[in-house]
């Protein structure tokens, strides 16, 4: 279907796919100018165990991603359900998203946001064109998770919430 006109209405597409819940992550990097940058995504996924690879899909309209791309590496910060405001901070365009945040560096120096339940430090492997987004593939270099964290921030059907495990 590449190159042909779509017969699917974009609003309907978004509404139907909105029934599939996604986690919320913030991708961070230290840019060439030495300043931190970040953007919120709901399109993060694991790709491969061997080698360990992950991917996320920033919008081509993102003003943060072009600055971060040139860093050659990045950190994926998985947000917890109490971190809705942090998600909103990094979903907005412009401004100093790191103002007042006491972040810590990954082994490669990229920002780990305060209180995240998990983080993944990655090297940039490749970027592929995907319509109005990019597919960014990252090779995992280091990672950590807090097993006592209450759970991830989830986005589904236009709203944020939390994950609750089904009874076994």
Image (cartoon, rainbow, N blue to C red):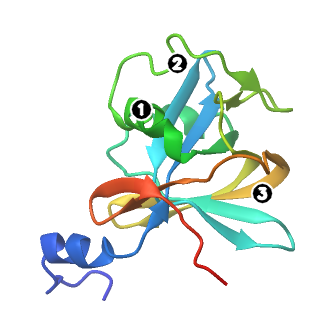
Is the residue under label 1 in contact with that under label 3 (CB below 8 Å)?
no
* Secondary-structure class at tag 1: helix
Secondary element type, mark 2: loop
Q: Earlier in the sequence, mark 2 or mark 3?
A: 2
Residue topped by disc 2: 98
Residue in the image at 67% along x and 67% along y: 46
**Which mark, residue 85?**
1
Q: Which residue is mark 3?
A: 139
The image's mark for residue 138 is none
Which one is in front, 51 or 91? Answer: 91
Residue found at x 43% / y 39%: 84
Decide: is 87 above or below 34. Answer: below
Quarter the N terminus occupies:
bottom left
Where does the image place residue 13, in percent across and percent down from the top left? 22, 76
Figure check: 128 above or below 122: below
Measured Cα–Cα span from mark 2 to mark 1: 13 Å
Nearest to viewer (mark 2 / mark 1)? 1
State how far apart marks 2 and 3 are (Cα): 25 Å
Kindly identify the residue that appears in the image at 78 percent across and 26 percent down. 109
């Amino acid at each position: 279907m590449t190159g042909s006109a779509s017969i699917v209405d974009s609003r309907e597409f978004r509404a139907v796919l909105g029934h599939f819940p996604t986690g919320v992550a913030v991708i961070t990097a230290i840019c060439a100018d030495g300043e931190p940058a970040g953007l919120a995504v709901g399109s993060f996924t694991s790709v491969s165990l061997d080698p360990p690879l992950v991917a996320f899909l920033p919008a081509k309209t993102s003003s943060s991603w072009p600055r971060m791309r040139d860093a050659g590496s990045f950190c994926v910060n998985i947000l917890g359900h109490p971190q809705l405001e942090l998600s909103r901070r990094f979903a907005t365009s412009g401004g100093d998203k790191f103002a007042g945040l006491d972040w810590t560096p990954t082994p490669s120096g990229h920002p780990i946001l305060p209180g995240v339940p998990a983080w993944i430090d990655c090297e940039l492997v490749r970027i592929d064109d995907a319509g109005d987004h990019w597919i960014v593939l990252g090779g995992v270099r280091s990672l950590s998770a807090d097993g006592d964290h209450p759970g991830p921030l989830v986005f589904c059907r236009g709203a944020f919430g939390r994950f609750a495990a089904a009874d076994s």
